[in-house]
Image (tube, helix red, strand yellow):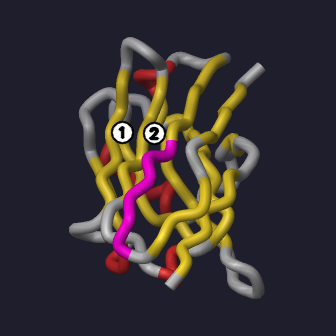
C-alpha cells in the first residue's frame, strides 16, 4: 500500500524556520513526483512545491519562491520542505502527495502541483506562524 507520512509541523514565530518531512513507502520512489500542499481555514488547497524524485525537477508556487526549498532523499525515500522566513500567511495544514511521473518527471511535477486526480495523499501536519 502507498503510504505518505508527513511530519515536522509546529508553532513558530514570524521569520522563523521549520523543516517538513514526508516519508514514502509502497511504491517505486524514483518513478514518482512528490509535492507539498497546504490548506488554510476557509481556503482551497494549493500546491506549493513539488519535486521529481528521479531528475530533481522542481516547482515552486510564487508566494514561497526564495523562502522554501524542496529536496528529495532517494536513499531514505523521503522528501523534505525547508521553510525559512515564515510568515503568518503560511499558517495552514500541510500535506504531502505523490503521483506517478515515470520518465517525464518535469511534466509529472507540474501535473501533481496543479492538481492530479491520481495522486496519493498523506495526512496533514499543522504549521502555525505567529506574528
Q: CA distance from mark 2 to mark 1?
A: 4 Å
Residue at screen point 61% across, 45% down: 97
Horizontal relation, residue 84 to residue 49: left or right:
left
Q: Quadrant of the N terminus?
A: top right
Residue 79 in view, yes or no: yes
Q: Residue 39, how many percent across, how many down?
A: 67, 71
Label 2 with label 1: CB-CB less than 8 Å: yes
> What secondary structure is marked by label 1?
strand
Horizontal relation, residue 101 to residue 84: left or right:
right
Q: Residue 34, how many percent across, how many down?
A: 49, 41
Alpha-carbon neighbours of circle 1 within 10 Å: few (<14), some, or many (≥20)? many
Residue at screen point 43% across, 76% down: 14
Residue 108 in view, yes or no: no
Which residue is nearer to you in this view: 100 or 130? 130
Residue at screen point 49% across, 49% down: 35
- Residue designated by label 2: 33
Residue at screen point 36% across, 79% down: 63
> What secondary structure is marked by label 2?
strand
Note whether 34 is above or below 87 in the view shown.
above
Alpha-carbon neighbours of circle 2 within 10 Å: few (<14), some, or many (≥20)? many
Q: Magenta residues, as a range?
A: 15-20
- Residue designated by label 1: 52
Q: Residue 101, how many percent across, how many down?
A: 45, 37
Give the image quarter of residue 99: top right
Q: Which mark is residue 93?
A: none
Magenta stretch encompasses residue 81: no
Counting residues from the N terminus, which is met first, the one under dot 2 or under dot 1?
2
Amino acid at each position: 500500500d502507498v503510504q505518505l507520512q508527513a511530519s515536522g509541523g509546529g508553532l513558530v514565530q514570524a521569520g522563523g524556520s521549520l523543516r517538513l518531512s514526508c516519508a514514502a513507502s509502497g511504491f517505486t520512489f524514483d518513478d514518482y513526483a512528490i509535492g507539498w500542499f497546504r490548506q488554510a481555514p476557509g481556503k482551497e488547497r494549493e500546491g506549493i512545491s513539488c519535486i521529481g524524485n528521479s531528475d530533481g525537477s522542481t516547482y515552486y508556487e510564487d508566494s514561497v519562491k526564495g523562502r522554501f526549498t524542496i529536496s528529495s532523499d532517494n536513499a531514505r525515500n523521503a522528501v523534505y520542505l525547508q521553510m525559512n522566513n515564515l510568515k503568518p500567511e503560511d499558517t495552514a495544514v500541510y500535506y504531502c502527495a505523490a503521483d506517478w511521473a515515470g520518465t517525464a518527471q518535469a511534466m509529472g511535477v507540474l501535473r501533481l502541483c496543479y492538481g492530479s486526480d491520481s495522486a496519493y495523499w498523506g495526512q496533514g501536519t499543522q504549521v502555525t506562524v505567529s506574528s
